Image (tube, rainbow, N blue to C red):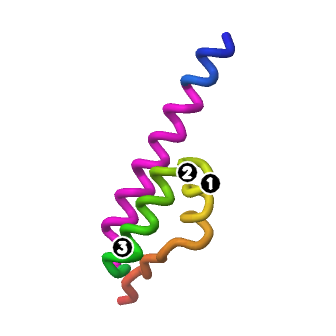
Amino acid sequence: MGLEIGGLLGLVILAFDLWALVHVFSSPASVGRKVLWSLLIVLLPVIGLIAWFFLGPRQHAATA
């Protein structure tokens, strides 16, 4: 049973990491920042995801 829960948790983390990477690449940040955030998310999946969530570039909503 532990293997199934661990595998499911790994898939959830992978899905969130991919979501974060898509948002990093679509952000208006510079290329250097995109590379740094991408490396952090890929090399440290959980810590990088949490750091990106709180410290990463924000996309501003268009005000009409």
Residue 35 covered by magenta stretch: no
Q: Could you say where residue 34 lies in the image, as x and y percent from the top left?
A: 37, 70
Could you say which disc has been placed on residue 27 in the image? 3
Query: What amino acid does circle 2 point to?
Result: Leu
Q: Is residue 18 left or right of residue 9?
A: left
Q: Could you say where residue 14 lies in the image, as x and y percent from the top left?
A: 47, 40
Residue at point 39%, 88% (across, down): 63
The residue where tag 2 is placed is 44
Residue at point 55%, 51% (across, down): 44
Real-space Cα distance between discs 1 and 3?
20 Å
Could you say which disc has been placed on residue 13 in the image? none
Query: What amino acid does circle 3 point to?
Result: Ser
Mark 1–mark 2 CB contact (< 8 Å): yes
**Magenta region, main secondary structure:** helix
Residue at point 45%, 66% (across, down): 37
Q: Could you say where residue 39 lies in the image, as x and y percent from the top left?
A: 43, 59
Query: What amino acid does circle 1 point to?
Result: Ile
- N-terminal-most mark, 2 or 3: 3
SS at mark 1 in the image? helix
Residue at point 55%, 23% (across, down): 7
Q: How many marks?
A: 3
Q: Is residue 23 above or below residue 59?
A: above
Q: Is residue 49 left or right of residue 34?
A: right
- N-terminal-most mark, 1 or 3: 3
Q: Can you say which quadrant of the picture contains the C terminus?
A: bottom left
Q: Residues within 10 Å of mark 2 (few under 14, many from 20)?
A: some
Q: Is residue 36 left or right of residue 30?
A: right
Instruction: Tell me which corner region of the image, top left, top right, bottom left or bottom right, holds residue 15.
Output: top left
Q: Can you say which quadrant of the picture contains the N terminus?
A: top right
The residue where tag 1 is placed is 47
Q: Which residue of the protein is positioned furthest toward the right in this rendering?
A: 2
Q: Which residues are magenta?
A: 8-28
